[in-house]
Amino acid sequence: MSDDSRPKTAAAGADTLSTLLPMGMVASRAWLLAHGLSKDRLDNHVKSGRLRKLARGVFCQQHAALNWENVVASFSLSMDIPAYAGGLTALEEYGYSQYLTLGAQRVIEVYSTLPEPSWLQVLAGQVEGVRFRWHKTQRLWQPEAVEQQIGVLHRPWSPGANAQVLARAETAYIELLHEVPEQISFEHADEIMQGLTSLSPRKVSLMLAHCKSIKAKRLFCWFADRHSHSWWKTLNDQEVDLGKGKRVIEKGGRLDKRYWITVPASLYQYYPDDQT
């Protein structure tokens, strides 16, 4: 009986690991222990090579091929980290912005209420062609918007793959505007808005109501006015809290007197009621 017990135990351990940590996913030691893997079995998996150590306290299955999509999916599925891919990354995934490689690394924009994990950049070095930029959401979104996942969706990045958490287009564009002009140019943001012809008015209104960034909200209204898509015509920007006073966003730019922000002279548009 003892002769049969070892292979059965090993097989059971393998099944437990495969169930807890599907191929390609990443998990922390603390998460694996909290979800039923014993300390002895975890250590044995590491010694036998079934678990590969990626960074301190972070593992994947031995032959797993890492990609950024599974890393993002792992945050919520096997890390208990409330994080999602948003901003420009989400818009690229929806086809609203083309990522041009040109030998450069793609930046994966990650949003979370928590600080960046200390191991993330170590892990990022093992994911070819990308680097991660971590954004804390406190200055951008009301807490309930993130906690209740109002502005995100769960979708597989490929057929049969684990679902990653991705910002909806309405959410992602507001997040992108929070980075103008430091990380994203006015021209790039303008080009993306041109293609956002089918946003949901309800979701736009909802996310603007939950947004804490006056800068992002004013820019959203300014770009929406500029392109005048049909979904924008059904909304009332007077219902959006745009704060008070002027905001210098483009240094040396023209002052738009509808939204009281400075914008590039090349994109400035005149309103009949402007007093210049």
Image (cartoon, rainbow, N blue to C red):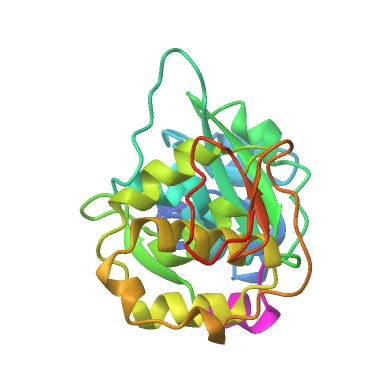
Q: Is residue 263 above or below residue 20?
A: above
> Does residue 58 appear in the picture of this structure?
yes
Quick one: 254 or 99, which is closer to the camera?
254
Q: Is residue 252 above or below residue 69?
A: above
Q: Is residue 167 above or below residue 255?
A: below
Q: Position of residue 264 (x, y in %)?
A: 58, 39
State which region is magenta: 140-149
Identity of the residue furthest to the left in this view:
159
Instruction: Report the residue at 42% width, 66% height from top.
Output: 170
- The quadrant in which residue 131 appears is top right
Q: Position of residue 148 (x, y in %)?
A: 56, 83
Instruction: Report the residue at 40% width, 69% height from top.
Output: 153
> Does residue 50 appear in the picture of this structure?
no
Question: Left or right: 208 with respect to 22?
Answer: right
Q: Position of residue 263 (x, y in %)?
A: 61, 45
Instruction: Report the residue at 73% width, 46% height from top.
Output: 57
